[in-house]
Image (cartoon, coloured by chain):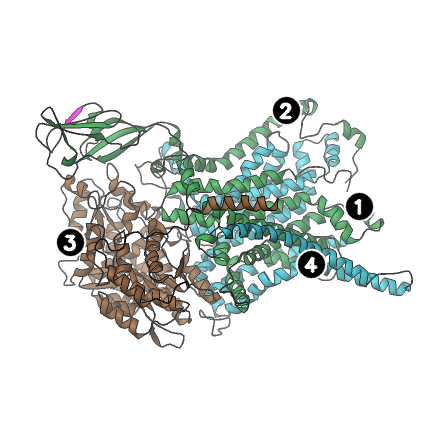
Amino acid sequence: MHKYLLAGVSAFAIALTSSAYAQELMFPKGEGAFSWDSLQAFADAHKDLSGQKLTIWGPWREGGDQEMFESVIAYFEDATGVDVEYGSSENYEQQAQIDAAAGSPANITILPQPGLLADMASKGYLVPLGDATKQFVLDNHAAGESFVSLGTYKDAQGNPQFYAVPYKSDLKSLVWYSPDNFADAGYEVPQTFEDLQALTEKMVADGNTPWCIGLGSGGATGWPATDWVEDIMLRLHAPEDYDAWVSNDLKFNDPKVVEALDLFGWFAKDDKKVAGGVAAVGTTDFRESPLGLFTVPPQCFMHHQASFIPTFFGEGVELGTDADFFYFPAFAGKDLGRPVLGAGTLATITKDSPAARAFIDFLGTPISNEIWMAQSGFLSTLKSANVETYSNETLKGEGQILLEATTFRFDGSDLMPGAVGAGSMWTGMVDFVGGKSAQEVADAIQASWDAIK
Amino acid sequence: MAAADTAAARDLPRPTTGTPRWLARVSVGRLFTHAALLLLVLLWTFPTAGLLISSLRDKDQLAVSGWWTALSTSLTQGVSRIGTAADQVEEAGRFVIRGNIFGTDTNKQVDSFGLSNAAPAAAAAGQTLPMAAGGEITVQRDGSFEWVSDTAFTHSRGPRVFYVASIAPRFTLDNYIEVLTASNVGRSFINSFTVTIPATVIPILMAAFAAYALAWMRFPYRGAIVALVVGLLVVPLQMSLIPLLSLYNNIAQAFGAADGKAYLGIWLAHTAFGLPLAIYLLRNYMAGIPKEIMESARMDGASHFKIFTSMILPLSFPALAAFAIFQFLWVWNDLLVAMVFLGAQDSKLVLTGKLVSLLGSRGNNWEILTAGAFVTIVVPLIVFFSLQRYFVRGMMAGSVK
Amino acid sequence: MGDVVQQVLSAGFAIAVAVAAAGAYFWGTNWLLDKVLASSPRMTSGEMSRRDGLRSAIRPWLFLFPSLLFLSVYLVYPVLETFRLSLFDKTGRSFIGFSNYLWAFGDSNFQQSVLNNVLWLLIVPALSTGFGLVIAVLADRLWWGNIAKSLVFMPMAISFVGASVIWRFVYDYRGEGQEQIGVLNALVTWFGLPPEAWITIPFWNSVFLMVILIWIQTGFAMVILSAALRGIPEETLEAARIDGANGFQIFFTIMIPQIFGTIVVVWTTITITVLKVFDIIFTMTNGQWNTEVLANLMFKWMFVNFDYGRGSAIAVILMLAVTPIMIWNIRRANAEEGTR
């Protein structure tokens, strides 16, 4: 009897889990424009890891990101024989912190917030990667120097150490639009910020609504506005001012920052310029906001959002045909070049092991970048990664913007302390759109910054 | 409370069945009762009904129109890109591109169509419009179109056709199928049961004894312990995560394991988190058991242990059942504790965690949420129904306070 | 998949072991107590009563021990740890006295949260208990009462992710002229009024969020009160009916006094739930538009800003807020003892 029960249970279990463990390689080795040599070289250099376990904790969950990252991991497993377990959760930042504090971190922790990593480093949760890796990032990544400084934090004793390597980048200075709708209405892609403002006014004059702006994001409501303000900061003022702003050497309620806020308000705080009116800005979910570009008739013509957003365009919207992007332009009247705002994820070791070291090395191989480039939503700053592997022209074009950037700056709110960048600044943006003045909001944010010093 | 005149009481109807005599006396009140309860139930059910209907709707419709519109035919405006030169066929000297603007979707009917955003309803279904790229197009009610030209097509980018279509009400189980066939959903069900059942049974056992002691035994500090239990109800769970997880990790590492994330840990954690409410509810219920029952038992020389197991436990069944329901629910729907103490690896995901990850990996799709919410609700409802029958009147029958 | 089998078996095993262990513990220790401190006829009466006294002094602690052990490790210890952390700075290394508390009382978000929490405490427990009681009483008298109760209970069973979707379908806002997918705005526009972004209107947005919690907690109140109502002896009710009492009189003069203890318990429990409420605010507004409450503020400082000091200070304040309820419960417990 007992035996039958057991057999029954296991048959049931087999039926339940049969689909689980077949992780196949997404692209057959040796085919396409991939740098297969780098995979072979990596495999040859890491021969003795077979059978080891590696845990990775990261942010990728939504929009198929988890599957894509796991497809990259499959090549690492194939090359080394290491058994990788990847995990993520809705509140992955909190959980990374909880696990680190409690002493059960993953081997590799990947986070998009340098501010958070700096915090973890100061509590001694991170393992320094060493000078060789630092040199590698410096030499092999576009804007290597800025990535080195992005991954360098003070350890528990206050000494700066290099902790984190960049892996996946996002480009924020983009405006999405429907080429068909632009053509039908006779609008042209603006080349300067002045043109962008003129176009906005022209659309209003034509009785159209230019922008879709949605700040809703559940617990993170408000963040899409921070990208707007950061992008505008980079266009109004010198990059040095931006850096000073992020480190609060330039106060948040400085006239320069207030000016940037007001310029964002020029777009977002005008019922005629935003779909659904100003009241809709604060409550519309950022994932649903771009859908207004594709409705009939269109609710709006333009949408400012980072390179990840096509994931949420919905089925049937084809990139390049139905939707395209243009660079969020710079002022012609200011000599500030072509500033670019970006973001990205950084990989760190939170529990040291040979397999963890190998994985950090793996992220520096072109193949680890190309596998994801060939899918979607992945931009690489690794110079050796073959741009031919980008899956579409849109990604290639975004890569182009990255290359043409004269100024590259990281998402400021991610660099600010959490209480500001993921707290009072979000609230401030929501309040600003809700009716408060730029000065009021800036004062409140500065006050919250003072309160954590 | 005065003892009832039992002889008279026996002749009287029971309120749960309601016999004509009583009904006749208060029939207006009775009607009012029906109406009032109906109103309340409707109010309470209305939002859930929205979720249920939404979960049966086409996923494209969810974020576009209100769920109540699903019950009637509604109008929608849409756009579709039609074929390029590569799709043309030559027929009797003319060039034709055919297709259906709805693709494989058979739920819509074209009312009118047009060729620009400005005029999406320029022509009625079945009529013909001239195309900018040459030739003319006819769109039928079922969405099939025919674009005919005397000269060969050369365009490489299909033009857009706009339409106003009516959508017939349609309900589908696709959302449920999508949720239930996702990989590892079965595994998550098992994980959830594995976590939930022990985490419901263990605290009931422990709390019942403690509640009895706090209700019926005399000892110093009794009031203080009751107050402590009430006070502990308010401890925010988040506070205990880090201290407990590091405790677990230390214990696990002492035994050579990598970390302390195991089922035993989560059972014990849920047990402890459920204890204050369990003790509080059960103590209150047990304290309300008529003293006479206890005294007669004491008189017969029964020990506390005997009284507890043979009298109090059976008498407390309604309260035990009530707590069991809530503990089951809370553990079943918990995400935070499971994520922290078990981890988020696929093999260890509980059902709520699985849902959240499904939700993520398919974009911001409400259909998963709506169907998923009903998939998770089924088990708690079964538990509720099966335990509800223990809330029966008359468990204390024969005892009068 | 072998591990699935193993998991199912080990879960079953765990239940068996837990039940057996608990049974063995309670039965075993009792047996041991009676054995070791047994009274026998050979003893002097003084010895016998000493032993009797000792037995009845020890027994309660045997009953309580497992619970107290768990409560200490899993709740008391973290509370003490929290209190300790609240006196330290954000890294948890340097002692800063009561600075975190001083900061909290000066912080405008904190003040806003306290105000909102008071509102929540006044409204939610009262309405949840009230509705729960009314539904329990009404449902008890009707043949379809069980169906009604199950339907009212449903919100309790829906996970939070699901509940937040449900209420988005109620409060959702689309700009004027667009099709509304939120019930409330659809109603409003049907009457020809402009749609409102409900969750952004200060004060009323808190009320709209409270509605969600009332909607959920009424099921809890109903189940507990319903169980208590079933405990009212049939004879009592019938006696009242014979005396000619109508439904309202029975409700107010018999049912409520009879289950008053349970009403207090339900009220207390919901009050405490309200103090801890966090998910609703987190998922619907995250404290924007002046809807902040203490529990959410605490979560933010703990796990978004990673300032354990301030997060802990807010948690301690939250826990202190429950003191009046604790004192009241001590009084009740002692009063009950007096009657016995």
Please state the extent of the stretch shown in magenta in the rendering: B127-136
Q: Amino acid at mark 4?
A: Leu
Q: Amino acid at mark 3?
A: Glu
Query: Camera-side residue: B202 or A80?
Result: A80
Mark 2–mark 4 distance (CA, rounded to whole Å): 51 Å
Does the residue at mark 1 contact the one at mark 4 (Cβ under 8 Å)?
Answer: no
Residue B27 image label: 2
Label 4 Cα neighbours within 10 Å, binned few <14 / some 14-19 / many ≥20: many
Q: CA distance from mark 3 to mark 4?
A: 75 Å
CA gap, disc 3 to disc 2? 77 Å
Q: Which of pointers 2 and 1 lies earlier in the amino acid sequence?
A: 2
Marks 2 and 1 on same chain: yes
- Disc 3 designates what residue? A194
Q: Position of residue A87 (x, y in %)?
A: 41, 56
Q: Chain of mark 3?
A: A
Mark 2 falls on what kind of element? helix
| Residue at image mark 1 | B292
- Residue C64 badge: 4
- Cα separation, mark 3 vs mark 1, equals 88 Å
Looking at the rendered image, the disc whose residue lies closer to the viewer, 3 or 1, is 1
The subunit carrying tag 2 is B
Judged left or right of residue B145, residue B154 is left
Q: Is residue B395 on the magenta stretch?
A: no
Instruction: Identify which amino acid the numbered label 1 is placed on.
Output: Glu
Whole-angstrom CA distance, mark 2 to mark 1, is 38 Å
- Colour seen for chain B: green
Tell me residue B240's x, y (percent). Answer: 53, 61
Question: Which chain did the image draw in cyan?
Answer: C
Relative placement, left or right, of A168 versus B233 is left
Q: According to the colouring, which chain is brown?
A: A
Q: Is residue B45 above or below residue A157?
A: above
Front-most of A388 and C25? A388
